[in-house]
Amino acid sequence: MRGKTTNKYGLDEKPPLMATLVYGLQWLAVSLPTIIVIGQTAANIHFSDSASQINYMQKIFFLMALTMLVQLFLGHRLPAVVGPASILLVGITSSQSSSLDSIYTSVLIGGILLSLFCVTGLFSKIEALFNKKVVATILLLIALTLLPMIINLLFTVPAAGLEMFHFGFALVLLLLMFIANRYLKGIWKSTLIIWTLIISSIVYIVLVPEYAWMSGGSLLSFSNFFAGLNFSFSLDAGVLISFLVCFIALSINDLGTIQALGQLINAPQMDKRLSSGITVTGIFNILAGFLGVIGPVNYALSSGVIATTGVASRFTLVPAGLSILIISFMPGVISFLGGIPPLIIGVIFLYIMCSQVAAGLVTAFAEEDFSIDDGLTIGIPIMLGLTVAFLPEAVETALPNLLRPIFANGFVVGTITVLITEHLIFRKRKIKTIAAVNLD
């Protein structure tokens, strides 16, 4: 059974084989950039040697492919792209001084709790806390607290004296991406990021001969993948609390994506799809912790792809999922993809985060009675989160080890603050403010 749609192919319809392969190639083109950009960023944070980075990327490709395929048939059963959760990148960035074992133990525990909350029905009870202003602030915080990492990517230069060139290149490329996003249509717009990756990388290499594209490794290898499985349980309370806050945002993101996608294609039994989908996300975050990589989440851009292609069949994502799975055992291909210049990755990340800010603002101002107190509810956490994100290294180092992953994490500080401002500080004053506006 499928919901009523105006799409060429409905949710449970199976297009002809050739059409399925063509649409699958489109989904692959949409999926690859986010896996490459976020995965490579996390790999660079953890490792300096290319062999470890390639192994990390292999596990990410494997995890995302498996998550996508399971979601299609056992989870929410909707045509949704799955990729690394950028919100978990916030937790990883703020916990760099901690061990990898403690970071990924926290990811594993976060996945366990997310799954349990869905299975037991507790998730629906805490969902009420996250109204539009809270969700809007979280969307903004994700983007803004990643700014230090983005700046670092933009100004990672292969030779001294290229900083101003990088700055100019980044501004021009970002402007061109937004112009292209405004005027391109259909599949060209949906695959803008992958074309940007290809074309801008070529242009950069031509203009900057000092940059050496690192690639290597065998074309097909299973031994390299399994050699990197060395999980060791290590609990750090500060890191765990930081990641638990990140998982709250991850769950809200997953919830919103599944809801929006279900409404777009009028999918039936949405309550069951929501519960199953978020549970699967939790389970594969457990696996992510065990593998020692950043965990998965459903991507909201899936709705845009369906809207532009007119194809809502979940079966068209199967070729994309299988292709990503095959790539996970091809270190040579992953090494080549990982050679993309950091500047290009930084610009694309900035483009994605600009869209995130736009989504946050749209969510915030959807209410007609938006008041000054509502503005403060969002503004205070944003400013505190930014302040913490740019803390001087000396201040961050002076914090106790237990508190550093919490109070040196702009996202965590901002999220806690918005919950306090929304549900405590401005809870009663908002009624008076709205009343005063109405009287005037």
Image (cartoon, rainbow, N blue to C red):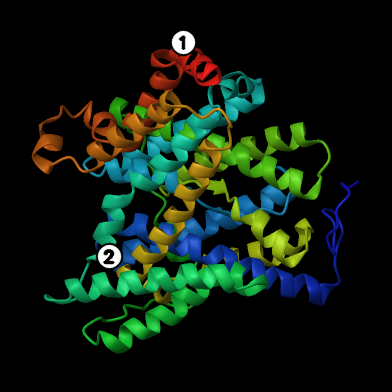
The residue shown at (33%, 44%) is: 145
The span from disc 1 to disc 2 (Cα, nearest Å) is: 44 Å
Residue 66: percent from left, percent from top: 61, 54
Vertical order, 299 against 282 (above or below): below
Residue 18: percent from left, percent from top: 80, 77
Query: Which residue sits furthest right?
Result: 1
- Please name whichever residue, 221 or 5, is drawn nearer the observer in this view of the structure: 5
Report the side of 78 relative to 339 (left or right).
right
Location of mark 1 (residue): 428
Of the residues shown, which amino acid type is indicated by label 1?
Lys
Residue 59: percent from left, percent from top: 47, 57
Of the residues shown, which amino acid type is indicated by label 2?
Leu
- Please name whichever residue, 261 or 295, is drawn nearer the observer in this view of the structure: 261
Residue 340 makes an appearance in the image: no
First in sequence, mark 1 or 2: give its number: 2
- Please name whichever residue, 351 or 149, is drawn nearer the observer in this view of the structure: 351
Characterize the local packing of mark 1: few (<14), some (14-19) or many (20 or more) Cα atoms within 10 angstroms.
few
Vertical order, 92 against 353 (above or below): above
Based on the displayed image, in which of its 4 quarters is residue 152 positioned? bottom left
Location of mark 2 (residue): 154
The residue shown at (49%, 16%) is: 436
The residue shown at (36%, 78%) is: 216
Which numbered marker is on residue 188?
none
Characterize the local packing of mark 2: few (<14), some (14-19) or many (20 or more) Cα atoms within 10 angstroms.
many
Secondary structure category for the residue under label 1 = loop
Query: Which residue sits furthest front?
Result: 440
The residue shown at (28%, 33%) is: 384
Residue 279: percent from left, percent from top: 63, 35
Based on the displayed image, in which of its 4 quarters is residue 344 positioned? bottom left
Residue 93 makes an appearance in the image: yes
